[in-house]
Amino acid sequence: MNRNRKIVIIGGTACGPKTAARARRCDPDADITIIEQNEHLSSATCGFPYYVGGLITRRNTLEVVKPAHFRNTLDVRVLNHTRALEINRREQIVRVTNPAGEEASLAYDKLVIATGSTPIMLSGAGVELGGIYPLWTMLDALHLRQLVEQRKMKEAVIVGSGLVGLETAEALVLQGLRVTMVEALDWLLPKLLDFEIAAYAERELKKNGMELLWGARVLRFEGEDGWVKEVITDRKTLPADLVISAIGTRPNVKLAADAGLEIGKAGGISVDSRLQTSDPNIYAGGDCVENVNRITLKKTLAPMGSTANKHGRIIGTNITGGNETFPGVLGTTVVKAFHYNLGRVGLTEAQALEEGYAVETSLIPGLDHAAYYPGAKKMLLKLIADRKTGLILGAQGVGPGDVAKRIDVLATAISFGATVDDLANLDLAYAPPYNSAMDPVHNAANVIRNKQSGMTEAFMPMELKKKIDSGEEFILLDVRSPREREHCAIDAAKQTKLIPLPDLRARLDEIPKEAEIIVYCQTSIRAYQAQRILKGHGFGNVRFLDGSIAAWPYDTLGSKPYAEQSGLPIALDAGI
């Protein structure tokens, strides 16, 4: 008679519990044990900032599945408050210890390492002061919630502008604190977003009272009576009653490395497509492993709960005799920033250029449903593609509109190797309450197709700003109405000429044919039309400003900035 398969899982946050649940469904007789060093299993770590901010009111909702469920319903042995000390691969034993210092050895047939990641902690003089925390565990979340609800703290500094930093910043603002975010690089979410999208989002943070300090490094912390009071950076000194460390994470690989398992160049445990390590009896998943980037085919880290859960299901299948593979990741991400939604997938423009692609982009202002139907909300969508093949490489979106829907569509398209031609003809659902006849995704694809064919040429906002600041001579042609210009205009008096689009054909003689011309309007629809008119009349050097005023990330002239204006021209529904 065959004995029951022994499965030991180290780690109980996301990948580990998912593995256990799947393994139990696949093998009703397996002997399954989860080792977790903390009290809670299957915690909703991604919900911690919303608990700190008071949006989630009850802590028990963050315990997605309690240990008792695993023990009683799934017949999984749970050893919480237990730490794995050593993996003995030769004898196939894991040595563990509990808080009392008692040690035990657990034999396994299949071992799963789901040890996750650890926050990178701040360094420098004064880092040991009270009031300097990460937001990583359930205990961190409980402690921070208690601190901010005492209403004694007024100033908070978030070090790092990644996902955790952004979500925690909003949480603290909602709790009434003044928040400053410090980032060593040059804009928000610098590893996830290009400048144009990040700058658009930064407006929303500032509107909600946040101070943003980019290109700054923390030097030290000053305190009083053992509690932090100031953060000293190389740019300025910031008052602080509370400091949140959000400078990133690193995979927990020590246990695996000490056992002689292969660690990859990206720093995670090396696994194959079946999530098997260099030892055929050991699998690994979640934040602690390396993944394949589905575009570059290079190894990367992907510390996301969604990825960890996919890993867990595949591992649970494979350790019980199945044969499933994981295709890799695209870095698909969405995050809330007050009333804005931010999302991204694939490569940024900068990353695509680093990979050697001939990059073409589009920057599309749009609405999340038909402009004439009440409640339409704005968004800005950036699409990145290979100029030669049209292959979609990445996308980013920001705004109060439904960004997540577009990012999910694009993640699906990229997963199946879609080109801009494919994207332009996707049969997406349409009715005025839900979408426009041409979704922003369609428009973004069509702009790139127009650029590929040579039908149009565009100028990106950052390029135009450099030209303006350098004092170059060119014509910045505004084809909106005088009233629109009064409300909001690019600050370039020396270069600007106003000719409303309906008057353009009659006033062509006012524009020198040899001049460099950059056309803009509200959303680029009219600018594109003006460019076609000018090209048709022999003007050789004409481009439009990608996204126009709607995507302009810099300060503007006028009484009503674009972001405060309601709606967009219905002409957007006509497509590109």
Image (cartoon, rainbow, N blue to C red):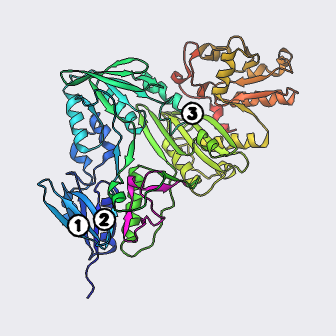
The answer to the question of whether label 2 and label 1 lie on touching residues, with beta carbons closer than 8 A, is yes
Q: Which residue is mark 1?
A: 76
Q: Which residue is mark 2?
A: 21
Find out whether residue 70 is within the magenta segment.
no
Lateral position of residue 194 relative to residue 89, left or right = right
Question: Crowdedness of circle 1 by 10 Å Cα count: few (<14), some, many (20+)?
Answer: many
Q: Secondary structure at mark 3?
A: loop
Q: Is 98 located above or below residue 31 in the figure?
A: above
The residue located at (63%, 52%) in the rendering is 426
Q: Secondary structure at mark 2?
A: helix
Question: Crowdedness of circle 2 by 10 Å Cα count: few (<14), some, many (20+)?
Answer: some
Give the magenta-colored segment's residue range. Answer: 266-293
Q: Name the residue nearer the viewer: 140 or 523.
A: 140
> Mark 3 against mark 2, which lies toward the viewer?
2
Q: Quadrant of residue 362?
A: top right
The residue located at (55%, 55%) in the rendering is 294
Q: Position of residue 223 (x, y in %)?
A: 24, 21
